[in-house]
Image (cartoon, rainbow, N blue to C red):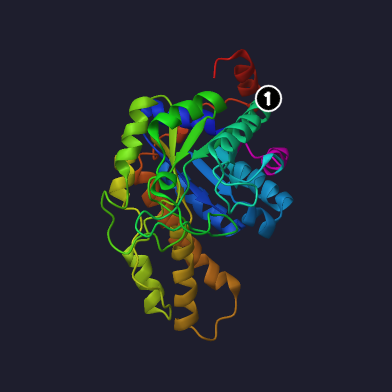
Amino acid sequence: MALITLRQLLDHAAEHGYGVPAFNINNMEQGLAIMEAARATDAPVIIQASRGARSYANDIMLAKMIEALAAIYPEIPLCMHQDHGNDEATCMSAIRHGFTSVMMDGSLKADARTPADYRYNVVITERVSRMAHWVGASVEGELGVLGSLETGEGEAEDGHGAVGTLSHAQLLTDPDQAVDFVTETRVDALAIACGTSHGAYKFSRKPDGDILAMGVIEAIHKRLPNTHLVMHGSSSVPQELQDVINAHGGEMPQTFGVPVEEIVRGIRHGVRKVNIDTDCRMAMAGQFRKVAQQNRREFDPRKFLKPAMDAMRDLCRDRFEAFGTAGNAHKIKVIPMDDMAKRYKAGTL
C-alpha cells in the first residue's frame, strides 16, 4: 500500500516545483476516476473527505475504499486527507480511521459557521498539530476566512463556511500574521484566504486582482519560502462543463471560477495543494443529465455512472498535467507514518 502523508508529498512537490490537486470524494466512482487519471499520468494523489462526505459515506466505508484504491493502484502515492476539520475530535477520529493528514480549520469556531479570533485559531491548531505529529500524521491549518472579495459575503457549502458579511481583513490572510501562525502551530501546510470560495458561484466575471488577490500568496511566500501553501475553493468552473449541464436540461447561471493559469501562477509562488471539488461534481452531473435526456428509458445506474466517471477522469488528468503533478509518482519513495512520527519527535520536521 502506497499511503503517504501530506507533509512528505508536499515536500517532494516543493523540491520539484509542482502542485498537487486535492480532489474531494464521496463514493467509489469518484475514487476510481481520480486514480485512473493518476495512473495515466504517473501522478501522486491527494484524496480528501469533508465532514459531510464522512457522514454520507460512513468512516468505515471510506477507510476500506481508500485501502482498496491503494491496493488496486500500488504504484501511486496516495494521501487521504480530512478536509475542514472543525475540532480536535473530528481530526483525531479521521486519523483513527486511517487518514494520513487532517485539516484543522480554526478560522471558524466548532460550529463551522462563526469566524473565530486569532488566538482561538492558534491554540486549537497547535493542539491538533501536537497530537497528529505524535503518530506521524500531517496537519493543514487555515488563516483567514474563505469568502468573496466581490460581495464581502462568506460562503457555506456541505455544512461548512462562514455566514454573513465579512470584513476585508478577514477575507485576506495577513502575511505578517502568517509567519507567527506557522511558527506557533507547526502546521505542515497553510491554507490562505485570497478571495476564493467553495461552490460554483465564485465570481460574476473573470476574476482580476480586485477580487482574486494572488498578490497575497506571493507576499506570504516571500516571508515563508519553506511553508507549503494551500488554495481552497479553487475549482475553475470550466465553461464547457457549464454548457454540457445547460444543454441537457440544467439551469446553471453564468459563473466564473479560478482560472487554471492563476493557479499555476500560485504554484510558482509556493502553492503546493489545490482543492478541487465543484469541477468534479460538474463533470459527473453533466453526464448524468446527458444520459437521462438522450435515453429516457435508461434505468441502469452503471449507464449513468460510467460516462460520469470518464468525464471526471479527464478533468482530473487535465489538472495533474496543468499543475506539473504528472510524471512524479514513480519518483517518490513513501516514508511510513511511524518514521514520520520519529522525525517530528526528533525535531527534524
Q: Amino acid at mark 1?
A: Trp
Residue at the top extreme, as displayed? 346
Residue 175 visible in the snapshot: yes
Secondary element under disc 1, as helix, strand or loop, is helix
> Between residues 291 and 23, which one lies in front from this camera angle?
23
Position of residue 121 in the picture relative to residue 180 (left or right): right
Residue at the bottom extreme, as displayed? 297
Assign the C terminus to one quadrant of the image: top right
Tell me: residue 153, above or below residue 107.
below
Residue 28 located within the stretch drawn in magenta = no
Assign the N terminus to one quadrant of the image: top right
Q: Position of residue 83 (x, y in %)?
A: 57, 46
Q: Position of residue 315 (x, y in %)?
A: 41, 56
Magenta residues? 90-101
> Between residues 106 and 334, which one lies in front from this camera angle?
106
Tell me: residue 242, above or below residue 183.
below
Tell me: residue 291, above or below residue 77.
below
Residue drawn at 39 percent across, 33 percent down: 175
Residue 100 located within the stretch drawn in magenta = yes
Residue 43 visible in the snapshot: no
Q: Residues within 10 Å of mark 1 (few under 14, many from 20)?
A: some
> Between residues 162 and 84, which one lies in front from this camera angle?
162
Residue drawn at 38 percent across, 76 percent down: 246
Q: Position of residue 241 (x, y in %)?
A: 37, 66
Q: Position of residue 151 (x, y in %)?
A: 38, 60
> What count of labels does the image hold?
1
Q: Quadrant of residue 6?
A: top right
Q: Quadrant of residue 74?
A: top right
Q: Quadrant of residue 139?
A: top right
Q: Which residue is mark 1?
A: 134
